[in-house]
Amino acid sequence: MKILLISSNTTITPYPIYPLGVSMIAAALTAAGHEVGQFDFLQQKNSMDSLEREIERFKPELIGISVRNIDNANLMNEQYYIETIKGIVKKVREVSKGKVVLGGAGFSLIPDLILQETGADYGIIGEGELSMVNFANNAARRVYPQERLIGARTKLSGTEIASAQYDEQLMKYYLDSGNIASIQTKRGCNYRCVYCSYPLLEGSKVRQRDPRSVVDDIELLRGRYKAKYIFFVDSVFNDDEGVYLEVIKEMIRRNISIPWTGFFKPQGLHAEIVKLMKQTGLVAVEIGSDAACNITLQKLGKSFSFQDIVDSNNLFVHYEIATSHYFMFGGPGETKETVLEGIENIMGLKHCVMFIFMGIRILPNTLLAQIAIQENIISPEEGMLKPVYYISPLVDKKWLEETLTAAFSKTRHCIFPPDALDNSLGVLHKLGYSGTLWDLLLPGRNAKLKRRHGAK
């Protein structure tokens, strides 16, 4: 069966990310004997005409659309992506008789409302490899499910999570846009952050891919595609179980070193681990610090303190690894006092970059949604398809925005709002600079990057 998979993502914050989920579904469908094409809406500059031409050329019998994000989760500059999905479905309907199936992390958060809003035929909730292959196998025999929403009955074990089927043209586009290639080492998250959807999407148990397969992916990306920078897309790279160390050890065993980055938890790290990771090429970390004082960290369900954030920051800085943090103001328990304490704490962090958010996007079935209902911020019937943000009732929204703006507007390494650098980073990527590039804001980084890229 000919199947066209469409990545609908158009966001580039904080940098363009290869549509890994689509390529992993493509791998599963190809292994099942189907002919699969991949189309990326961002690569095609959001062009419906390009989509139409690809459908007419490929003539798919089934179309899958990946919904990575519902919106950009940025109260200061809201962007809503469901209209884009609606437009894609409409265009597909105009030029193809194939069934349209939605999936992806964003879709799985509010599947019933997104399916209704977009008018697609079916939707797959959660992990898609098994469900999409089963759907396609049946569709090839003109057999379709009675229910429009299809949930995954079982999850793949870690070793069953296969490598992505990277698309050569898509990879070229994303490497030209920053040289960052994506790899997943595991699925699942056993943390209990009140706002987070990862445990809902991937399960609360960590499922580790075979470290050998992960490193095979690195060698493929580095060798065949000439990738210069790897981004491990795991929700948290340094999991408490320490399975991430098996990937590091396999890289060391094969004598592999390539610049890489990932999301880190500011806990459970020490000098020997950081030195091992640096040996494999770790050059930058993005730390999910999330709240800026102990009271608000506890209210977000974090198991670490602000001192842990300080210690991890100092550890990475000591080993000359570019370090960034993400902080959210306005969460549960936030007061004027905790805001001011948080600002002071952030200003005390040295040699790092901070991305500052105001408010927290409320997602269905999270503890934050329950809190928001209890505090009458949303009603129990609230669908939350359109962005709804939690801001503590103990803090005035206008005061919070003015206070954050006054605190960070003239501070080069504190980015508020969090997308303030997007245009500048986009230009640098077009000029051939690779990597995250927010590290340009760190003292001395500009000169180092110029030497690295041969800029004058």
Image: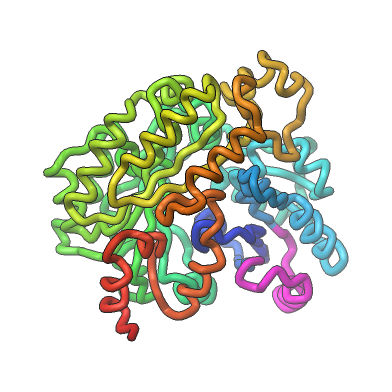
Judged left or right of residue 305, residue 149 is right
Point out the residue furthest to the bottom here: 456
Quadrant assignment for the C terminus: bottom left
Q: Nearer the viewer, residue 197 or 300?
A: 300
Would you place residue 127 above or below residue 447 in this image? above
Q: Does residue 336 appear in this view? A: yes
Judged left or right of residue 152, residue 147 is right
Q: Where is residue 282 in the image (x, y as percent from the top left)?
A: 25, 57
Judged left or right of residue 234, residue 310 is left
| Residue sitting at x 46%, y 39% | 327
Quadrant assignment for the N terminus: bottom right
Question: Quadrant of residue 58 in the image?
Answer: bottom right
Q: Which of 238 and 245 is in front in this view?
A: 238
Q: Position of residue 52 (x, y in %)?
A: 78, 73
Would you place residue 67 above or below residue 156 in this image? below
Whether 9 is among the magenta residues is: no
Judged left or right of residue 62, residue 301 is left
Point out the residue furthest to the right here: 94
| Residue sitting at x 40%, y 54% | 413
| Residue sitting at x 47%, y 20% | 299
Q: Where is residue 445 in the image (x, y as percent from the top left)?
A: 30, 66
| Residue sitting at x 56%, y 30% | 330
Question: Quadrant of residue 55 in the image?
Answer: bottom right
Q: What stretch is highlighted in magenta?
A: 41-63
